[in-house]
Amino acid sequence: MISSDISAPAVEGGTDLVLAVAKTCLLESHLQTWSEFMASKESLFRKEALGEGEGGESSEYVFGWSQVHEEFEELVQRGIGERLIELGSSMEEFGATIASLAGAPTLTLDASMSEEASQAQAFVEILVGMMEFRAFVDIMKNKAKRDYYFDILGMWRRQLK
């Protein structure tokens, strides 16, 4: 469980951990796995696959979307968990660190934040954003957005120190 009651020193202290996980998540092999997973499930999100119902979305397909989202979360968490084991850390420590980074001041408003801490916070925002159900569904419904998303992640990977 992620705790939001974390002191400021935990943010700076967890930066190395978050960046190590970010670099692993952004490896070409991980991004390829995520992209292939999404491509294999995209047909569930096409308009023609939707049944009748409010907004054209049947509860069956919304439930199906939830299942796909959960599978994607598990895929991402498995990769994170494997890296944490290699680093001698835990999902609990990582969760506490990302909770503190998620609550830190906005990147552009905090000039005192180190570049590494800024990169770590940006990764946390991206990680939290892609785990949000509505954002996930939006990306799944639109291949162009999905392709752009992976292009951005690939470019960001090359910029991480």
Image: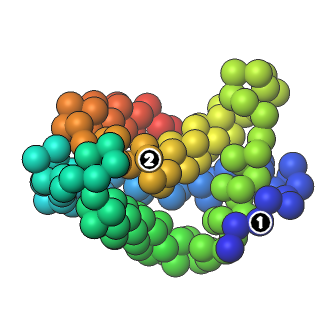
Nearer mark to the viewer, of 1 and 2 = 2
Q: Residue at x 68, y 40 (%)?
A: 117
- Label 1 vs 2, first from the N-terminus: 1
Q: Quadrant of the N terminus?
A: bottom right
- Image coordinates of residue 159 in percent, x first then y, are 43, 31
Report the disc number at residue 3.
1
Q: Is residue 39 left or right of residue 157?
A: left
Q: Is residue 84 above or below residue 35?
A: below
Out of 13 and 60, give the one closest to the viewer: 60
Using the numbered discs, state the Cα–Cα distance from disc 1 to disc 2 in whole angstroms. 23 Å
Tell me where residue 18 sits by quadrant. Answer: bottom right
- Which secondary structure lies at badge 2? helix
- Other-residue count near label 1 (Cα within 10 Å), few / some / many at <14 / 14–19 / ≥20: few
Q: Is residue 152 left or right of residue 104?
A: left
Out of 11 and 105, give the one closest to the viewer: 105
Q: Residue at x 62, y 59 (%)?
A: 17
- Image coordinates of residue 137 in percent, x first then y, are 34, 48
Report the disc number at residue 134.
2
Residue type (three-letter) at the residue carrying disc 2: Arg
* Camera sees residue 28: no
